[in-house]
Image (cartoon, helix red, strand yellow):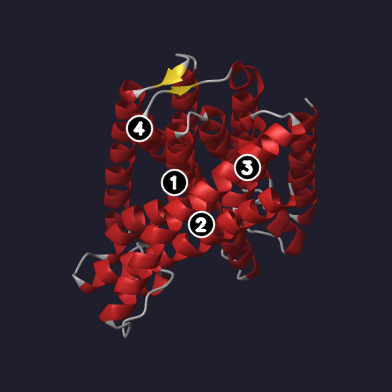
Amino acid sequence: MITAWLLSGLGLLILLLAGDALVKGAVNLSLRIGIPALIVSLTIVAFGTSAPELLISVKAVSDNLPGIALGNVVGSNTANILLVLGIPALMATMHTSECDTRKSFNQMIAATILFIGLAFRGVFDWVASVVMLLVLAVILIDAARDALAHKKGDATCAAVGEDDLEGVDPDMPSWRIALFLLLGLIGLPLGASLLVDNATVIAKAFGISDTVIGLTLVAVGTSLPELATTVVAALRRQADVALGNVIGSNMFNLLAIIGIAGFIGPIEVDPEFLQFDLWVMLAASLMLIPFVYLGKNITRLWGIGLSTLYAIYLVVVLVG
């Protein structure tokens, strides 16, 4: 049992390091061959930071563990709001009124409602995948247009430049770019395999379902990169970055991760999701309304509240 926990932790560590390596390699390669920084930010970085979740869901589907695949996404989205915004707020107030995120928030809520609606079909198959990926494509195209339109506008919400992209190194040699890409492409499937296989062993040993493991251990683990990014943004008083990171990550989790995994095989929806977890995810998403629409800052008091709600959610999932 100790070995399973250690191997799960190792798998998670490999996933995080491999995902970071893949993003660095892909970003520098893309900029080297002339792809604009804006497009890199909206596509390569967004997909790259979601690579751990994607590989876990694909591995889970291929191993006939739909609970881990769905739990990973639903649990990550809930954790992204309650935990990823809650913990940084304990360290410093996030002034979320500094940048207008209403449009992207509305798109996230629409994606959440679409996801829940498709879940009530009982399965995420290729039809659902096509719908979700088409919606994601529309959102990305719209985001690109908006960013280009605001390129010369307010600096807080301006389009992304090369200096804003994490991992950019104009002097990075070609061999290092290739090494980062190779490490990412090898490490991601290896880490996903270690984490999923050993998380399944842990679930069986404790007599809990793969759904619960996906909603807790796997979901929290794959939310660690978002947590790290948000902590740094909060300490630098970049509330727009923190909130945008969470909203963007949640949209990609819903539309891209399950959208792609659904082509690997049908993902059966456990009734537990329909009765409880999907609605918790939606409720957590709607809790952003005061920060997006009412100009409220995420203070330490809010941080305590959000973190406490997440702790209660974990207890309910584990005990139930």
| Label 1 secondary element | helix
Q: Earlier in the sequence, mark 3 or mark 1?
A: 1
Front tag of 3 and 2? 3
Label placed on residue 15: 2
Q: Position of residue 175 (x, y in %)?
A: 29, 79
Disc 3: which residue: 199
Q: Position of residue 248 (x, y in %)?
A: 46, 47
Seen at 60% across and 16% down, the residue is 271
Front tag of 3 and 1? 3
User: 320 left or right of 49?
Assistant: right
Q: Earlier in the sequence, mark 1 or mark 4?
A: 1
| Label 3 secondary element | helix
Tell me the distance, in whole angstroms, between the alpha carbons under discs 2 and 4. Answer: 20 Å
Disc 1: which residue: 55
Seen at 45% across and 14% down, the residue is 121
Label placed on residue 76: none
Question: Is mark 1 in CB contact (under 8 Å) with mark 2?
Answer: yes
